[in-house]
C-alpha cells in the first residue's frame, strides 16, 4: 500500500483489496436524523443501525473479513469438546506469540474478567499506560485501583511524537518501590482512549526491566496490536524492514501474559488469553468453563474461531495492517488542513476530534464530546463514539471525574469504507465546525451507575438540535 505513488503527486491511500460483498446504506433526511437522535436518548450507542449512514462507532467486530476468512468459516469443526478448529487457533497463536498456553474467551472483556478475578485483590493496584473502559471496570469491581502512568506527552492533544502511548517506566519503578501491592502491570498497545496512540518497543523493553527488577507480572492488552505493529515499522528506528511477524514475536517475548479482543485483532469476533507459565494458566483455566464455556471454544462460535486463525495470519501482512492507519492519516490530515481540531499525530483505530477545542463553549459537565457525537449524526448520519467525561464513571462519593480529553472518535473499521465516503465525513465535519456555535450541551436523564455511556440517556440543554437542522436545510437545500 505504501509503495504506490500517484503521478500527480497526490498522497492518496490506495486499497490493496477489492470489495466483493456490499451492504446497502440509507441516509435519512436531516429532520429524521434529529428525531432518531432524540429517540436514542442522544446516545449514539442507542441508535438503530438502519438509521446510520456511516457507522464509525467502533472497529470492534465490524472490520471487513477477507475471502480466505469467509471460506475458512465453512470448514469449521463444530464440536463441543476437542474441536480441530480450536487446535488450529491455538497453534496459530503459539506460532505467532511463542506462548505455550491459550485460553479462549467470548471477547476481550471476558479475558479481562478472568485476569482480574485471578489477580486483583481489594487494595491492590494495577499500573498501566492508560485505562480502557472495560479493563478499569473489571479491576475496580474487585476492589483494585487503576494507576495511569502515561508519559505527559500522551495527553498532549497535538504533537509530533510518534509514541504517545508510552508508559513512564521511572514512575512505575517508583510505584513498585513504594511497597504497594501491584497485582500486575497492564500495558495497552495502540492506546484506545487517547486516540489510538502506539507504544514503542524501546518503551516495552524499559517496562520489562522494571518488572524483572521488582518481580512484577507484565500483562499485555494486544487488542490493537495490528495498528501498533504498523507504527513500530513506520516510526521506530531500525524496524522499517523487519518482518511484521518478527516484531509481533519481539513484543510477545517481552510479556508474561497477552490477551486480546478478536473483535479487533484478527477481524472476527472472540478473544483469548495467551500465557507462558503453567501454574498461572491452571488458575485462570478453572474460570473458563465457569464464565465462558468449555475449554475448546470459550463462548466463541467455531466459525469465528476459524476466521480469527486466518485473520491473525493476515495481520502479519503489511498491506493488511497499513490500510486503517493510512485512511486515518488521510482523514486527520484533511481535517487539520480545514482547521478542524484533531488529535495528532494520526493514530490507529480512527480519527479523533478534539471536542474540548471544537466546542470550547460547552462546559465539560455538559459532555462536549457526547454533544459533538449527537451533532455529527444530525449533520451527516455519521455515528461516532464519545470518549470523554461521559465514558468515565462517577467517584464513589457521586462526584464526576472530568476526563483528561474530550474526544469524538470516528472509527475506521478496516476495509469497510471507500475514500469517497471518508471524503463525505470530512465534508460534514468541516461544515459542523463552521457552525459549531449552534451546538449546545447534553445532560443525563437516565444514568446507569456502571459503564453509563453504553445505555445512559441524555437530553439537549436547549433547542440547539432544531437550530442546527434548520441551518443544514438553509445551506444544503433539499440534499440529504
Ligand atoms: C484496548 C482494548 N481492550 C479491551 C477491549 C475489550 O474488548 P471487547 O470489546 O471484545 O470486550 C477493547 C475493545 O474495544 C479495547 O479496545
Image: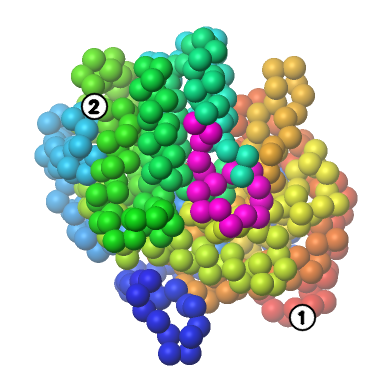
- Expressed as whole percent of the image width and height from the top left, the position of residue 184 reads 43, 21
Secondary structure beneath dot 1 equals: loop
- Answer few, some or many: residues within 10 Å of disc 2's Cα (few below 14, many 20 plus, some between 14 and 19): some
Name the side, left or right, on which 129 lies relative to 385: left
Q: Quadrant of residue 36?
A: bottom right
- Expressed as whole percent of the image width and height from the top left, the position of residue 261 reads 38, 40
- Expressed as whole percent of the image width and height from the top left, the position of residue 45 reads 59, 46
- Circles 2 and 1: CB atoms closer than 8 Å: no
* Label 2 residue near ligand 1, CB within 8 Å: no
Q: Earlier in the sequence, mark 2 or mark 1?
A: 2
In magenta, the rendered stretch is 154-169
Residue identifier under label 2: 276
Residue at the image point whose x is 55% and y is 27% from the top: 171
Q: Which mark is residue 477?
A: 1
Question: Up-down: is 267 above or below 296?
Answer: below
Asked if the stretch drawn in magenta spans residue 165, the answer is yes
Determine the main secondary structure of the stretch shown in magenta.
Answer: loop
Secondary structure beneath dot 2 equals: loop
Amino acid at each position: 500500500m505504501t509503495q504506490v505513488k500517484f503521478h500527480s503527486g497526490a498522497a492518496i491511500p490506495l486499497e490493496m483489496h477489492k470489495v466483493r460483498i456490499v451492504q446497502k446504506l440509507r441516509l435519512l433526511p436531516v429532520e429524521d436524523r434529529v428525531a432518531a437522535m432524540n429517540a436514542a436518548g442522544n446516545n449514539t450507542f442507542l441508535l438503530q443501525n438502519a438509521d446510520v449512514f456511516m457507522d464509525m462507532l467502533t472497529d470492534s467486530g465490524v472490520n471487513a473479513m477477507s475471502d480466505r476468512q469467509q471460506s475458512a468459516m465453512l470448514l469449521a469443526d463444530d464440536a463441543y469438546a476437542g474441536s480441530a478448529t480450536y487446535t488450529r487457533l491455538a497453534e496459530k497463536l503459539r506460532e505467532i506469540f511463542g506462548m505455550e498456553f491459550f485460553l479462549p474467551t467470548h471477547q476481550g472483556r471476558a479475558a479481562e474478567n478472568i485476569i482480574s478475578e485471578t489477580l486483583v485483590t481489594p487494595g491492590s493496584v494495577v499500573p498501566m499506560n492508560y485505562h480502557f473502559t472495560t479493563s478499569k471496570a473489571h479491576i475496580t469491581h474487585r476492589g483494585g485501583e487503576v494507576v495511569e502512568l502515561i508519559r505527559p506527552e500522551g495527553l498532549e492533544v497535538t504533537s509530533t511524537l510518534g509514541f504517545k502511548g508510552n508508559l513512564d517506566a521511572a514512575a512505575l519503578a517508583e510505584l513498585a518501590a513504594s511497597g504497594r501491592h501491584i497485582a500486575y502491570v497492564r500495558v495497552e498497545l495502540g492506546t484506545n482512549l487517547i486516540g489510538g496512540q502506539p507504544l514503542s518497543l524501546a518503551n516495552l523493553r524499559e517496562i520489562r526491566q522494571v518488572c524483572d527488577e521488582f518481580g512484577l507480572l507484565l500483562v499485555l492488552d494486544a487488542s490493537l496490536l495490528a495498528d501498533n505493529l504498523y507504527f513500530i515499522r513506520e516510526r521506530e528506528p531500525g524496524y522499517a524492514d523487519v518482518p511484521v511477524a518478527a516484531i509481533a514475536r519481539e513484543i510477545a517475548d517481552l510479556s508474561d501474559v497477552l490477551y486480546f479482543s478478536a473483535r479487533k485483532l484478527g477481524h472476527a469476533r472472540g478473544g483469548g488469553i495467551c500465557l507462558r507459565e503453567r501454574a498461572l494458566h491452571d488458575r485462570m483455566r478453572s474460570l473458563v468453563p465457569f464464565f465462558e464455556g468449555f475449554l475448546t471454544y470459550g463462548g466463541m462460535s467455531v466459525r469465528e474461531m476459524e476466521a480469527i486463525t486466518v485473520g491473525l495470519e493476515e495481520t502479519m501482512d503489511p498491506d493488511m495492517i497499513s490500510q486503517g492507519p493510512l485512511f486515518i492519516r488521510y482523514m486527520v490530515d484533511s481535517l487539520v488542513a480545514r482547521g478542524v481540531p484533531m488529535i495528532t499525530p494520526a493514530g490507529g483505530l480512527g480519527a479523533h476530534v478534539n471536542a474540548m477545542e471544537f466546542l470550547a463553549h460547552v462546559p465539560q459537565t455538559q459532555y462536549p464530546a457526547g454533544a459533538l457525537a449527537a451533532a455529527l449524526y444530525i449533520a451527516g448520519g455519521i455515528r461516532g463514539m464519545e470518549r470523554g467525561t461521559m465514558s468515565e464513571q462517577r467517584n464513589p462519593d457521586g462526584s464526576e471525574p472530568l476526563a483528561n480529553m474530550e474526544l469524538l472518535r470516528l472509527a475506521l473499521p478496516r476495509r469497510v469504507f471507500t475514500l469517497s465516503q471518508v471524503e463525505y465525513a470530512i465534508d460534514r465535519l468541516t461544515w459542523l465546525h463552521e457552525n459549531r456555535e449552534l451546538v449546545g450541551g447534553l445532560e443525563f436523564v437516565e444514568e446507569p451507575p456502571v459503564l453509563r455511556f453504553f445505555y445512559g440517556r441524555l437530553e439537549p440543554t436547549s433547542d440547539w438540535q432544531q437550530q442546527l437542522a434548520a441551518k443544514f436545510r438553509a445551506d444544503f437545500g433539499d440534499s440529504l
